[in-house]
Image (cartoon, helix red, strand yellow):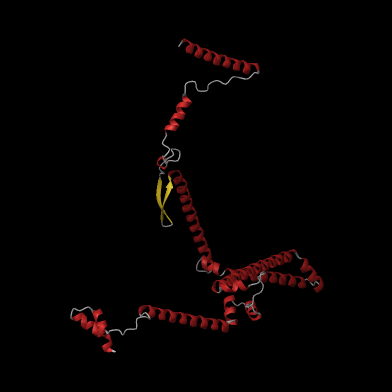
Amino acid sequence: MSNVNASHSEEAHGQQVSEEEVREYYSAFGIEYPEDENPDGSEGKEDEDDLNEDPNSDQDPAIDPDNDPEVKGLQVKYNGQDTLVPDEQVKDFVEKGMNYDKIKGRNQQYEEALNRLARQQGYKDHADLIANLDQIEQAAVKRQKDQFDLLQQSLREEAQNAGIDPEVLDQYLEQHPLLQQARTLVDQSEKDHSTRQAEAEQQKLVEGWEALFRKYPDLANEVSDDGTAAPWLTQDMHNRIQRGYDPIDAYELVHREALAAQTKKQAEQTFIRQQRLNKRSQVEINPAGNLDPQAPEELRSAFAMFGLDPKAAQKYAKNFE
């Protein structure tokens, strides 16, 4: 027994010497010897806790839905649906609503002022004034041109009364500052009006083409890649559009015979389809395999009056053929 104890003592001493030697080696090379990071066993305890966790648990504390905080806010109606506005956003929405009321009130003031201005010009309200805006602009351009002509005539009369030569008079009028300024204003007004009128006509034409393709969507598939040609865009149709025809009206007038034939064909196809559906429904009601004569309704009613099953009248149906 003493030999065994001695053997254990020697092994422990050898292990201690080996550890001391290792420490010396570390020290000789200037390397710090790694010490035990958890002398109190805390890390081991954490590992043990991890091992004791239930592996079959489906809930992760980090993403557990039961731990999500409840969103608090104000329930409101928006686009016909109940919507929850969080408390932190209520203030922003209230401020926007107050600003909207302010803008709405300001717009009402502008609208009332425009209505007053329109009535002063002889119109019902501002909408009536806007509807006649093109005519108003044309009248303004004409008025400026008339004023220019009147000014030019007045200057001409003054020059003639002064005995100025007609050629000198024309040069004088051409270089007169008032006439030059008036001519510039008139030219600019006419140019602006022409530009707006052209843009309005172009927009109207674009809307007309869009309406044509909405009504006849198959036409868009026949347009060339550059959008300038199509089999149905004949010269007659093009000329009508140039004369102010709406694209739909021009197309239907030029291709009225083809459209009438197409409409007739569609009606025939619809009729044939309906006939087939009617025949199919009759076949389903009276299958082809059932060739036995049917009992008349009078016989079935008589069976029912005497408390008999009306279906039994089928046996006597051949007597009523």
Residue at 59% from the left image edge and 70% from the top image edge: 204
Instruction: Name the quarter where the C terminus is drawn.
Output: bottom left
Q: Position of residue 154 (x, y in %)?
A: 71, 71
Q: Position of residue 79 (x, y in %)?
A: 43, 57
The spot of residue 91 in percent (x, y) is 45, 45
Q: Quadrant of the N terminus?
A: top left
- Can residue 149 be seen here? yes
Viewer-side residue, 92 vs 296: 296
Q: Quadrant of residue 24?
A: top right
Q: Residue at x 72, y 72 (%)?
A: 153
Which residue, as the protein is rendered here, is positioned at the far top?
Answer: 2
Is 82 on the left or on the right of 18, as rendered?
left
Front residue of 175/221: it is 221
Q: Quadrant of residue 87?
A: top left
Where residue 295 sits in the image (x, y, percent)?
27, 84
Q: Is residue 18 left or right of residue 165?
A: left
Residue 139 appearing in the image: no
Q: Residue furthest left?
A: 306
Of the pair 9 and 244, the residue shown nearer to us = 9
